[in-house]
Image (spheres, rainbow, N blue to C red):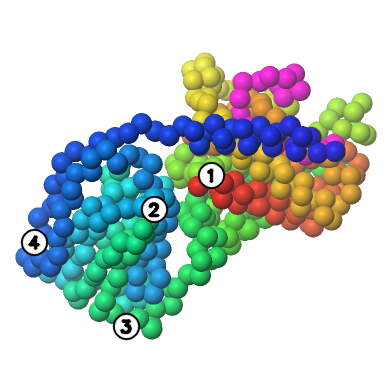
Amino acid sequence: MSRCEKYDVGKYKYELKKLNKNTPSKKKIVKKTVKKPTKKVKKTKTLRKHKSNYNSKYTIQDVYVQNNMIIIDFNTRITSSYLTFFEQKYSRLTKDVFNIVGTFKEAKQTKLKMNNVHRITVSQFKKDRIRIVLSNKTNLKTLFRIKKNRIIIEVTNIPKSKNRTRISPLMKKRYSFKRNKIVVIDAGHGGKDSGAIGPGKKYEKHAVLKVAKNLYKILKKEGYKVYITRTSDRFIKVRNRTILANKKRADIFISIHANAAPKAKASWANGIETFFLSPARSDRAKRIAAKENKSDMRKMDYSTKSSFLTILNRPKITASQKLAIDVQKNILYRLRKSYKNVKDSGVREGPFWVLVGAQMPSILVEIGYITHPLESKRLYSRKYQLLLAKGIAKGVNSYFAKNP
Ligand SMILES: [Zn+2]
């Protein structure tokens, strides 16, 4: 029944184990200079040299606001030497600046909200250091304390009760891995490129657009930053699809397509499969890729084609494969709750041009065969389209929960 479980999931676990073993080499901290604060200085701590105990595994797992506190959770026990503080005074603004040793993946200029504080930003301002800046018109009184693997920065001169930003532990967990994750959804084909055509002039481009738009709405609602390559029936060059993803610095790229079988096989060929990019292995993958690549593969110049192989790096392939497995599993799970005979055609690798240019883990989901009598009907039903999107979204959640 489930090929996915028999073959690919095992591989996923193995890959995960292998990845976890790969801890980066130790780094030494060189002398730190702390910026001289202007005018009034309240508290300043200098960063001491960390002997051997600092390396890049000191990652920050989460940064969030609870009442009048900013909480920074590390993956390990920490000391006060992890933090330096200074204050900057401007004519209309006071800034409390905290530099904290550690890397935090989600720190691409995150903003935190705390009532009565004008602005709080979190950024990875150096490779191994994040910076939290509290800006306010009036002077804020801040204190920090260290608790095992946690730094708590407390603003003591704002009314506690007015803060509504309390996040329950559960919410926090749900929230933390989605925050700032950027997903680009690609609705395959469009405009003059109809994609595959099924009986009764059923076009691939229509079914995939519906699913893509559903997915867009769901992910957006869940708190992701989401972009979509098209929201209407218009033609987009294959290359421009990943250009969008790269420009938006997406964390993942999901291209949605539907399959078609030649007449002789149309009555029985069905199933859902998820591809991740790799040089073609099987004839089958090559064939499907050739079909999906058709729209403007010919226009690709030599250098684009030859860069294909160089772009493929192991970590990206592994991440793409994980994403593919999570998405495939969850689509099947969702659909099978409501529909019988949902076929798992597995997670596969293939040389899809649409995935080539993407700098992030990327997959291509073939949501089914528009040439199959039963599957085709389903692919154009609203309920099925929605469940497909829900399944993909669950897969995305599952991927990020495991690979923050
Ligand atoms: Zn397609």
Q: Sequence order check: which comes first, mark 4 or mark 1? A: 4
Within-10-Å neighbours for mark 1: few <14, some 14–19, many 20+: few
- Label for residue 159? 3
Does residue 120 appear left or right of residue 178 in this picture?
left
Q: Earlier in the sequence, mark 2 or mark 3?
A: 2
Q: Is residue 280 magenta?
A: yes
**What residue is pinned by disc 4?**
38
Using the image, tell me which numbered label, if any, was put on residue 74.
2
Can residue 291 be seen here? The reply is: no
Which residues are the magenta region?
270-287
Q: Position of residue 287 (x, y in %)?
A: 74, 22
Work out how far the residue at label 2 is from the one at label 3, CA to CA, in angstroms.
27 Å
Against 298, residue 53 (above or below) is below
Q: Is mark 3 within 8 Å of ligand 1?
A: no
Return the disc, 3 or 1, that comes first in the chain's sequence: 3
Is the C-beta separation of discs 2 and 3 under 8 Å? no
Q: Under tag 1, what secondary structure?
A: loop
Say if the magenta span includes residue 376.
no
Residue, x 41% and y 63% (percent of image)? Answer: 64
Residue 403 badge: 1
Q: Amino acid at mark 3?
A: Pro
Image coordinates of residue 159 in percent, x first then y, are: 32, 83
Q: Tag 4, which secondary structure?
A: loop
- From this view, report whether residue 44 is shown above or below residue 66: above
Q: Name the quadrant containing residue 300.
A: top right
Kind of residue sitting beneath label 1: Asn
